[in-house]
Structures are given as structure tokens and as C-alpha cells.
Image: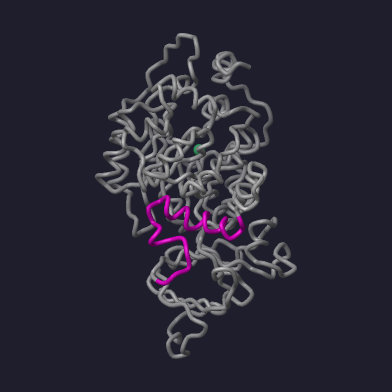
Amino acid sequence: MDFTIQNALIATQDDYITQSVRFIDGEIRAISKEFDQEDVSVSTLINAENQLLLPGFINAHTHSSEMWQRGIMSMFPLELWLAELYDFAPLDIEKVYLSALGTAVETLLSGGTSVVDHLVLIPGKELETIATAVRAYQEVGIRAFIAPLIQDESLAAGIPAGDTKQNYEPYFRSTQATLDIIEEATKKFHNPDAGVNIAVAPTGIQLCTDALFQGCTELSNKYNLCRHSHLLETKAQEKLAQEKYGCTAVEHLQRLGYLDARTSLAHCVHLTDTDIEILAATKSTVVHNPLSNLRLGSGIAPILKYRQAGVNVSFGCDGASSNDSQDLLEAIKIGSILHNVTDFDYQHWITPRQSVEMAALGGAIGLNMGDKLGSVDIGKKADLVLYDLTSLSLLPRTDPIGLLVLGRPSNIVNSAWVNGKQVVANGQVITIDVDNLRQELFKHSQWQTKRKSKSVADLEAHYRLVMGL
Ligand SMILES: [Zn+2]
């Protein structure tokens, strides 16, 4: 595919210039003020006048099937929230398909061209769940990193025991059987050239044994897979790590060899200064999920400290049950200005241009694709987004990136390409029938209010006790 985007506004170091960008076979081949007419005569021309061209952002942590419970989850901290979530998790493949489509569409229409789906698997239908997400993302055409969410301990084990004696039921599937599923999924679906990547993704230290982390590390080394996990999202997890290991979770994961430049870690709210040094030294990436951290009361991740320590940071929406949307621009805005209240020294605050760099290049680095994605440069993949600067929410004209990050932009993505293939045109996703998706989401759901979660009833008293409530 040979395209030329003409007369787009492109960010330079601290200004903007109008340029044309040519891409061939999914890659950016040339950037210039003007191309020779002869040169571009065989190329499809796209007029991008008054539009801002940016690299596609990366929705670096989400759980697509949580879409089915957005707006209804109780006001709970993570541990109880999870109990409620799993009591009502969809067990229907059709729903997995529809929520993956929905997640992809909302990501694309808020500036994302890649999604990391920490995918909740339907028990007994694990490979089918993964195959379904692959199919949905391929149909939409978004670049997908499917990170099947795995654990090998039962939910109650994720809450600290405190002074009590706890006996946990064993998890329903063995560690080896779980690793076998991930290896089989890798052989079947991992195809980076086609935009489908499988990642190893134990959910976190709270529900996983060392054997599971080590098995995932081996698979990551064998197939060059990215590594993903939740990390120290809550106070309870900080406490649990000390109970389980007698050290912090970061120290333990480093000892297990799980941390490296392919590792991205969602949340990272409760880290020590030594933990931060370890993340920097191992080149691990922090995925910042500010809306989820607020919604679940997890805390404010020390993002400014990470940046000062040289830790790479990207943005995620997290699942729609703890957000309750998939608007990447909203996550970027809140995740940037939230930190102004944590540090009086305004020179440390995140500027809109830095936000864009974190969301695009930061995300790419966290997926070990910093050389291929995340900026508008020759040789990089054409994962690009054009924003309509004549849209009401981006007017009047001031600094386009400032308007995009700090404003409340709506309906501003005019076009998007993934790997050189156009997936959004004139503000609409063109690869699937979004009207039909809307109807299906409507049909497969109903208005509801109160639900009773049995697992919450089982866990709540113990949670309150150990957390001193
Ligand atoms: Zn998550």
C-alpha cells in the first residue's frame, strides 16, 4: 500500500511544521515539505490540511471483557471489586468477541493504534477465548498484544492473612496446564508481522506462584514474548508481598528474573525507592492507569519519581469495569495533571508534549517495539493518527497538542492507520460495522442496578479485619 498524507501539521522539537509523509508497505518512507508530483503520482493522496499528524498511542493495559460490567461495579477497593467482577464475568464467547471489538473501536477513536489486552479467559474455553479476541482485533485492524490473564492460586489467597490462619482451596487448573495453554496460544496466534502478538501475563504476585512466573519467563525467552503483569496496585498487595516473601514484590520479581526490557507492569502504586531503582536498572516499563487507581482508591502512582529515575512510563485505560470507559485521551489527561498535586516543584510536571511521548513512544518501548513504533520518523511503521484541528473542541487555534491533552476533545480523530492500513476515515472506523456493534452490545445486555456477590460476602469481613477497617 502506497499512501501520501499531504500538508499535515507535524510536531517538531518545540514547534510545528506542515509536511507531507509518504508510506509504502506499511512503513514511513519519506517526510518532506513537498514531493515531486511524478514521485507521488502512483500514490493515493490524502489531504491533511488543518490536521495534526501524531504517532498512534498505545492503550498499554486493559481487560476487554470488563466492558460488560462498566457502570455497575460497586465502590470497592480492588480485592473486593475483583470478587464482584468474577462473580459476574461473562462466560460467553460471543460477548468476548463483542467487547474486544468495542475496546478496539474506543481505543482507535481516542488516538490509540495498539492495545494490550490482559485478557480474562473463560475457564475450559481458554484457547477459544484467545482465538476470539485475535479474530476481533484482526477484523478491526488494531495492533493487538493479547496477554492472556493467568494465575495459579485461588482468589482468597490475594488478601493478606494478617494474624489469622488461612487455608486456601487449590486453583482449579495446575501451573503446568496453564503454561501449556500459553505455549499453544503462542504457536497458534503469535504473528507480529500480522499485528497479533501474544504476551505472557501472570496477573500478579498476589495470585501467582514462583513456578508460574518462572514458566512465563522461560516462554518469553523461548518465543521472544513481551512480559506483562499487575504490580503493587494496592496497599493489600504491598502487605501480602512482605507476608509471602519477606521483601517487596519488585525485589522478588527481580530475583525470579521476570524483569527486563520486555516487561511492562500495570499500576505500580506502592513502590519503595529501591524498587524504583530496580525498575530503572532492569529497563522495565510502568503502565500508568490513573483512572482505575482513582476509581478503586488504590492511590496515586509516583509517576514523577519514575520519570526522574529514568523509568519508562506509558498509559493504559485498564479494564472498563474500573474506569469506566476506554478513552485513552482521558487517561492521558488525568494521568498527566494528577501529579501536579504531588510535587510542588512545577519543573517536574508533565508537559503535554511529554504526555504524547509517553503515550506513543513510551508505550512502544514497553512492548519492545521502540525502534518500530511511537514516532513519526522514517523507517517506523505507519501506525498514525490524524486529528481534525477544525473540530469545535480543538478551537480556537492555540497549541494543538496542548488542546489535545489538556482539553476535553471529542470526535477529533479523523483518520488512523495501523501498519499502513487505514482503519479510521472521516471520523469513522471503516473496517467493521460499528452500528451493528452498537446494536449487538445493546441486545446482549440489559439495564440493571443491584447485584449480590457471594464472593464479596465471603471475603469482606476478613478484608476489613486485616486492613484495619
Ligand atoms: Zn488490570
Whether residue 225 is situated above or below residue 373 in the rendered picture: above
Find out whether residue 98 is within the magenta segment.
no
In terms of depth relative to the viewer, which is nearer, 23 or 86? 23
Drawn side of residue 456 relative to residue 227, left or right: right
Whether residue 347 is situated above or below residue 176 in the rendered picture: below
Can residue 274 be seen? yes
Find out whether residue 374 is within the magenta segment.
yes
- x 70%, y 55%: residue: 408
- x 44%, y 35%: residue: 274
Whether residue 361 is situated above or below residue 263 in the rendered picture: below
Whether residue 92 is situated above or below residue 18 in the rendered picture: above
Q: Position of residue 298 (x, y in %)?
A: 59, 32
The image quadrant of residue 121 is top left
Chain part drawn in magenta = 351-378
The quarter of the picture where the N terminus appears is bottom left
In terms of depth relative to the viewer, which is nearer, 5 or 399? 399
- x 56%, y 46%: residue: 304
